[in-house]
Image: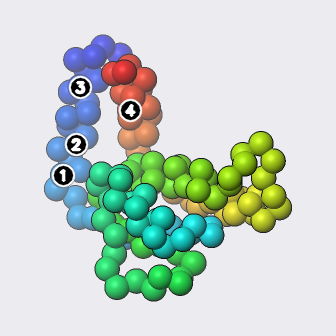
Amino acid sequence: MGKLKLYSKLLLTQAKTKFKKPKEYAIPRCGVSYTRMTKLADEVKGVKIVNNQDTKAKTFKVTSKSPEIVFGLVSQMPEFIVENINSPSKKDKNKLIELGSYLKKLEPLLTNMELYKEASTSLK
């Protein structure tokens, strides 16, 4: 796809997303502390943390206009879950399986993921 066509598709997608209402997503924490989840969510543009949530809950609630942004946030979580990726413990494996099942649940909502993948590879 040409860069001009890619830019036009990205701009059209961003314009559509701008006027959407944000949805609430409950992300499984998988053992990541509330503070780390907050810091990670602050780094990701387009995600807002839901106020007044239980810090001891097993889920972390955020709002976002696009499920692709939440997918990006959840994709960054394994580096906090598993310290040594070469030899994860049984407990870490279970946490990664839980995170993977959440990503599979989120996949049907992703409509523009291919567009974002193509944009990230061609615009580097």
Which residue is pictured at 45% across the width and 70% down the height?
35
Amino acid beneath label 4: Leu
Q: Is residue 123 above or below residue 12?
A: above
Q: In which quarter of the image is residue 100?
A: bottom right
- Nearest the viewer among 45 and 82 is 82
Disc 2 to disc 1: CB gap under 8 Å: yes
Residue 75 on image: x %, y %: 53, 49
Pick whichever of labels 4 and 1 is earlier in the sequence. Answer: 1
Q: Quick one: quadrant of the C terminus?
A: top left
Query: CA separation, marks 2 and 4?
Result: 12 Å
Q: Name the residue under label 1.
A: 18
User: Which residue carries the number 3 mark?
Assistant: 7
Q: How far apart are marks 3 and 4 (CA)?
A: 10 Å
Amino acid type at mark 3: Tyr
C-alpha separation, residue under disc 4 versus residue under disc 1: 17 Å
Q: Name the residue under label 2.
A: 14
Q: Name the residue under label 4.
A: 115
Q: What residue type is labelled 1?
A: Lys
